[in-house]
Image: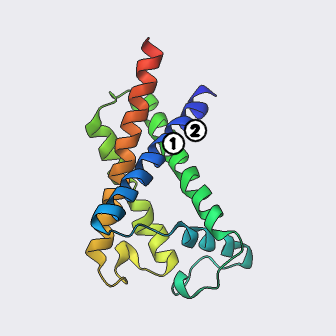
Amino acid sequence: MHLFLYSIWIGILATAVMDFIAWLRATFFNTKSLNYALIGRWILSFKDGRWVHNTILTTSPKYGETWFGWAVHYLIGILFSYVYLQLNLYFAFQYTILNILGFASLTTLIPFLMMQPALGFGFFACKTPKPLNSILNSLIAHLAFGFGLYIAVSCLVFIYRS
């Protein structure tokens, strides 16, 4: 039970760091991040029996898609945190920046292989105008999540050992 509660705190903090870095990138480098309303639209379309879209951009907006998409974004961060902590328990590896960033980089496989194709953007964003930019932006976002995960886990370990 403690692991699940820790995952909530860690996941929220790590996702917030990811969002802060996305805001910095948007502010200083004019880099657009994912519109989480599209994730909300995608999931809310499940009730209509629609799992895959030609492109989510042409699918009619759904009521509440923005807040729902943001909630899903944070729930995914909590889930990834839980998975990381479970892996750590199973394999008993050290909490290091390298293994956390390695884990975070592996989490990009979820959008590359599942979400982007379902949204109509193709595997590894191959149907977007600039697939390599999309891949790079996803990788940076997930590494930012990993950095937040490292900060949150480090704080938790420090508190636990004190």
Q: Is residue 43 visible?
A: no
Residue drawn at x 33%, y 68% as measured from the top left = 31
Give coordinates of residue 56: x percent, y percent. 54, 81
Pick the residue in front: 90 or 41. 41
Secondary structure of the residue carrying numbered label 2? helix
Q: For residue 69, which numbered disc appears in the image?
A: none
Q: Amino acid at mark 2?
A: Ile
Q: Dot 2: few (<14), some (14–19), or many (≥20) neighbours within 10 Å? A: some
Picture layout, residue 160 above or below residue 52:
above
Identify the element where label 1 is drawn.
helix
Q: Residue shown at 53%/66% (left/top)?
A: 36
Horizontal side of residue 113 vs 9, given as left or right: left
The percent coordinates of residue 6 (x first, y second) are: 55, 31
Q: Position of residue 8 (x, y in %)?
A: 57, 38
Identify residue type, mark 1: Gly
Question: Which one is in front, 99 or 6?
Answer: 6
Q: Position of residue 80 (x, y in %)?
A: 48, 46
Q: Pointer 2: what residue?
A: 8
| Mark 1 neighbour density, 10 Å: few (under 14) some (14–19) many (20 or more) | many
Q: Quadrant of the C terminus?
A: top left
Where is residue 140, by image quadrant?
bottom left
In the rendered view, would you say 128 is above or below 33? below
Q: Are marks 2 and 1 in contact (CB under 8 Å)?
A: yes
Q: Which residue is mark 1?
A: 11
Q: Nearer the viewer, residue 30 or 88?
A: 30
